[in-house]
Image: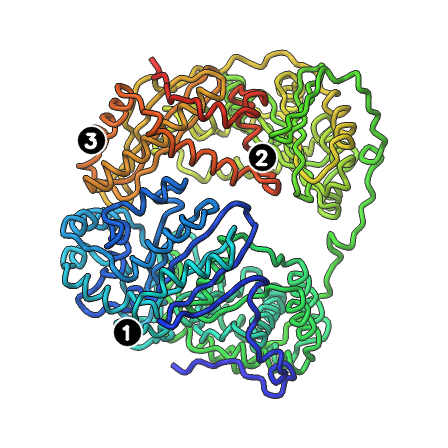
Amino acid sequence: MKIQRMLVVGLWWLTSAIFAQDLPLPQGAIKEQLPNGLTYIVLPNDQPKNKLEIRLVLRVGSYQEAAGEEGVAHFIEHLAFNGSAHYPEREAVSYWEGLGAKYGETINAFTTDDRTVYSLSLPTLADADLSKTLHILADWIGTLSFSPAAVEKERAIILEEIASYREDKDRLPIKVGNDPALVRLPIGTPSQVKGITLEKLHAFYHQWYAPQNACVMLIGDINTQEAEKAIKSTFGVLSQRGKVTMPPVPIIYRNKPLIATKIEAGKNEVTLYFPKTMHSLSTHAGLLQQTQEETLLRMARARLREALSQAHIDAYWYLRGTDFLSLELRAPIGQKLSTEVQKAVGILSGMQASLTQKEVAIAVARSVKELQEARFEKTSEEYALSFTDAFLFGEAFLSTPADRDTLIKALETTTLQQWKALAKTYFHLPAPLVVETIDNTTHKTTYKHYKQAVRKGQRHGINVLPKEETPTMDTLAIAPPAVLTAPINYNPEVIASEQYFKRLGVHRIVLKNGATIYLKPTTDPTLNISLLFKGGYASLPQHNSKQYEDILSYLHLGGIEALKNPDYETFLYQNDLTFIAGMDNYHHLAMATAPVAKSAMLCHLLKEKLLHPELAKDEFQTLIKEEQQQLSSESSKTQTDNSLDVQLHKAIGTIYPPTREPKTLSDLQTIDLNALHSYYQEYLLSSEGLLCVITGDFDIETVKKQICPVIAMLKPQQASHREAPSTAVRKPVLLTAPSKESPQRASFNIVYPFTYEPHLGSVLSLKLLAEVIRDRVVSEVRERKGLIYSPYTTIELRPSPAHQAYIIVSGMADTKNVNEIKTTVDNIVQTLKNKPLTAEQLAPYKKRFMINKNESLTPDNSYAWRTYLTDRFKDGIPLEELEQYEEILLDNDCQHKEQH
């Protein structure tokens, strides 16, 4: 298939010296190559602080596998963690875990058709630890060990991984062409994995694991000089061997079905994929070309919207050096999809002759706005992803405002004639790959008809001009009502006590009405005010709970009494304001955000939404009718949801709508908006036990005087209805559900109930225990027995109505192995109960806890601070204890209570 590439001769930017240059690396980055061919990249970066991302990337994957070697590349990736010449067995993993990393999370790896990537996320390393870490990775390139015992152990794990694997829905057979490395998965099939021998592993390893095929990346809290010295002393001694991997060729389509049909009731839609050779993004010119194509797609979408109500066009990278232009179309049942295809392609074809200066200007302005809003700072993990693509494909990325401004200038000075020429080339479409989803009553369209529709559309362009753009939220200025701009009268008499916690950087205020306020300044320019009220699903009236379970959704359909919808929504948009509300088992939340400079307006907004919401009765009735229609169209016999997720929620005492019987038409008919509002005001909107957490780059005294009067308006309300009886288990229980993909597989949860005291030491004991259980489950159930590929261990704390906790071990395995997994985990838990851990055994976990806490609770991570402060408040843990976190953690002996 001949694939057209965009070529516009004579444009000044393609001949300009600067546009022929490669895009520069980010400031401070070093990219070099050792004499043995190994590439290394070093970049100091403080986002986040005290963190180092390390990657060992190899241009080695299933693409390099010969016939009979299928699955070998992925197998070697597994074996790397089993030892090398200088670091036998799992010594490397143990060493990194001692530094605070976690195997399977911050110690990880993956293999695809074109790469193998080993990933480490570590705290800042001392020079000796950095040298040792690099020595381990150099060992992995030069002297990996393949012991027969390790091979058999990993074979069992990989076979379990295959059994657990769910096919990527995007990897459609028609999209991977004739390439043998793409029509199969890198992991291999069970029979292929069973046929992998030591000889095959050694041969592949020595042929492809070589310095000339590898890149080492160090990004984060790193000294460049020391890093280069360590890289040269560890990787520099390796010798070249084997072959040099070549970049994979673009996908070729030949003698393959080019259409796939799915049958689904009520559907009549088609997606056409047009493969295009990916152009280089290593230069300014390549990046400009990509930006121009994205801008053309903006214009194309506007035209398609004008003529076709359900059409969308986009472009994305799929595999190898192949891009796809995707055209999605929908039509009523019975209507020919090929007719829609011809019309859509005709609209695209018509752009080359009829583009107007106005629509170009609108599209360019939006592209420029996106470029201007783009951030140049990346996290170390984001840089690692970008540098990986740079190593594999030669891609680069914008890293300076100057490069961005150069790109904007070129975009803005592209003439109308040049845009037309670009459209002519870009929308000259190759033969498509077709995926249609149709109703079983619809006549199937042949590939020939789709291909003819594309050709006819290209020959007969359609001139569809977008209408004049109507005024948008950007142009319709809504004046704020007086209630949002009135002065806020501060009275210090509403405050019962206040205290500043220096280590946490949190200012606590307790009001006389029973509410608590945490003021936590961060570097975030957005001010966030989160209100956590007592009262959730468990406290709704039990005799008619289905009428109340969506109370917050119904009450907040509108704006506020002083500014009703749609003006309310427009006003929020124009002023960068947001408001949302939600409910969980025992609490409900109201959260609002705004730029810090609009803190007073935000406080007013919260007050009005809570005390004076617009009861949008028309929208409410419309929503109720839609729910009634949905219920009427469903089967009259609704089966009880007994999925594993619902089983788990019942077992740990969660009460929320999916665990109850669904609503009925009768329930919907009796819901009254005024009654909901009265109930909310009387029972849920209480200051007693309320927590307000405020984050952002604000001045404490300023915001204190704005928020205190608002929260002080709330009153302690009478207690809500009696809480529902808990369904929580009091003994360990195994929950299972059959896999939808295979009757021989099952998902499972093993739930272990505990109790805890409302203080930090008790909570930390349980979390330490959960981490120890996790590691022992991985070691026993996955590594030693090979019964499961990915076991997960989580902990759920339920402070209400009693302080209950649940450690949950979950995963998917062969049905015949689930009981053995349960017995093994039971033994692990019982052993830990009978033989408490020593201080030496707990030390690595405590170190990991401190590292994770310090990495998460940074000055720029407002979300982490809100979550941390809110969750600990729910657990009944005061700031006085959080202030002493390190001391309480170090003194913890991990004693815990099982629930009886």
Determine crowd level at label 3: few under 14, some 14-19, many 20+ residues with C-alpha closer than 10 A: few
Amino acid type for the residue under numbered disc 3: Asn
Front position among marks 1 and 3: 1
> In which quadrant of the rendered image does the C terminus lie?
top left
SS at circle 3:
helix
Query: Label for residue 865?
Result: 2
Relative to 457, 504 lies left or right: right
Q: In x, y percent, where is residue 171? A: 35, 61
SS at circle 2:
helix
Name the residue located 44 percent from the left edge and 69 percent from the top edge: 273
**As drawn, 454 above or below 203:** below
Q: Is there a contact, CB below 8 Å, between mark 1 and mark 2?
A: no
Front position among marks 1 and 2: 1
Determine crowd level at label 1: few under 14, some 14-19, many 20+ residues with C-alpha closer than 10 A: few
**As drawn, 881 above or below 772:** above
**As drawn, 101 above or below 881:** below
Name the residue located 83 percent from the left edge and 44 percent from the top edge: 479
Q: Is there a contact, CB below 8 Å, between mark 3 and mark 2?
A: no
Label 3 sits on residue = 819
- Mark 1–mark 3 Cα distance, whole angstroms, equals 47 Å
Q: In x, y percent, where is residue 861? A: 59, 41
Q: Earlier in the sequence, mark 3 or mark 2?
A: 3
Query: Label for residue 243?
Result: 1
Query: Which of the two residues, 578 or 15, is positioned nearer the viewer here?
Result: 15
